[in-house]
Image (cartoon, grey):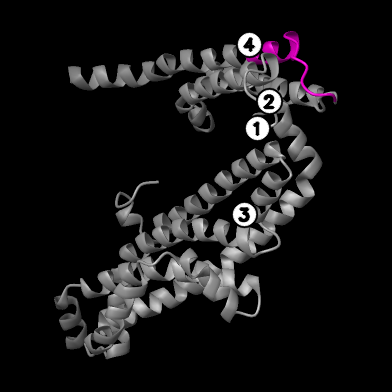
Amino acid sequence: MASETLTISQNRDAPRRLQPAVWGALLLWWALVALMVVVPDKPQGFAAPRFVNQTHELFAGFALLLTLLAIALGLFPRVALLAPLKRGGPWLIALALLVGAWETVTGKLALLPAPFFAPPRALVEAYATDWPRLLDSVLNSLRLLAFGFIYGSVVGFITGVAIGWSRSLGYWVHPVLRFLGPVPSTALLPLSLYFFPSSFSAAVFLIALATWFPVTVLTWSGVSSVDTRYYDVARTLGANSLFLVLRVAVPAALPHLFVGLFMGLGASFSVLVAAEMMGVKSGLGWYLQWAQGWAAYANMYAALIVMALLFSSLISLLFLIRDRLLSWQRSAVKW
């Protein structure tokens, strides 16, 4: 009973222990705003810096929002919507320190050479002035990734189920899988550009190939590892071969399938960027190469941030679907 009382008191004191991190983050973000507004920038180049005031307003708005959330957290520490703020307090502190150091060594002291390292306002300028091209690149990358990933996943799933169920088919497909699977898809880029009618279709093929290998291997592993007693019970109840595949083998292989989809999605990101850099006329990979060619490094960093957020969100969406379908196996792979 005493231990339970101690645990309850510790849980009640948890929000109070976490609040100092939030308040520390709040103070650091307002200090960052003061650094940007009060300390003048060191002149660089011949053109006057742009979007300085807009950058100050953006960071001040974020600091004000953080202030309101911190006040709400102090008044209502048990509100579930404020839980991410309590957990993210240390990260908010680290982010404020990082941005402050970035602003200091670039805009205030100019210790890093321009234009390779630009201050935060350069990112704001890149998003504000070049958002149509960046948005078009994001949409084209999503379109290319969707075609390649869906095709590779479907073909990989069918191939994995087929060779996992049929030993005779696995006899012929398995050596091909072991021979071609480990070869990086980007190594086949010259051949794909020759055999396919357009760079877009060649990029779709490479992304599908990068997705196909892990999905095939993991699906095959899942189907072949199903306990034979499940099949015996289903046959006793009158199940035919099609029922055994669709209602026994495939559901049992779903955990392995989602691991393969996770690995295939990660591989498809790398192939997507490489293919867009070498053949496709629009996309995030093309945008990175274009920005580097014009020495627009702020635009390149802006595209990298968008790319990181986009790819991380897609993987999070995949795991959300996995958790809905396999709620009994949430602890298998963490993200």
Residue at 30% over, 49% down: 331
Question: Residue 130: horizontal and vertical position, in percent?
Answer: 78, 44
Residue at 71% over, 23% down: 61
Q: Return the mark for residue 285.
A: 3
| Residue farthest to the top, as pictured | 38
| Residue farthest to the right, as pictured | 47
Q: CA distance from mark 3 to mark 4?
A: 36 Å
On screen, 312 above or below 222? above
Q: Return the mark for residue 119.
A: 2
Sort mark 4 into few (<14), some (14-19) or many (20+) by Cα contacts within 10 Å: some
Look at discs 3 and 4 and give the one toward the viewer: 3
Question: Residue 325: horizontal and vertical position, in percent?
Answer: 40, 61
Secondary element type, mark 3: helix
Q: Earlier in the sequence, mark 3 or mark 2?
A: 2
Q: CA distance from mark 3 to mark 2?
A: 23 Å
Residue at 75% over, 13% down: 37
Q: Which residue is mark 4?
A: 31
Is residue 72 among the parts visible in the rendering?
Answer: no
Q: CA distance from mark 1 to mark 2?
A: 10 Å
Are the residues at dot 4 and dot 2 in contact (C-beta closer than 8 Å)?
A: no
Sort mark 2 into few (<14), some (14-19) or many (20+) by Cα contacts within 10 Å: many
Give the residues in magenta.
Answer: 30-46
Question: Residue 306: horizontal and vertical position, in percent?
Answer: 62, 44
Look at discs 1 and 3 and give the one toward the viewer: 1
Q: CA distance from mark 4 to mark 2?
A: 17 Å
Is residue 92 shown in magenta? no
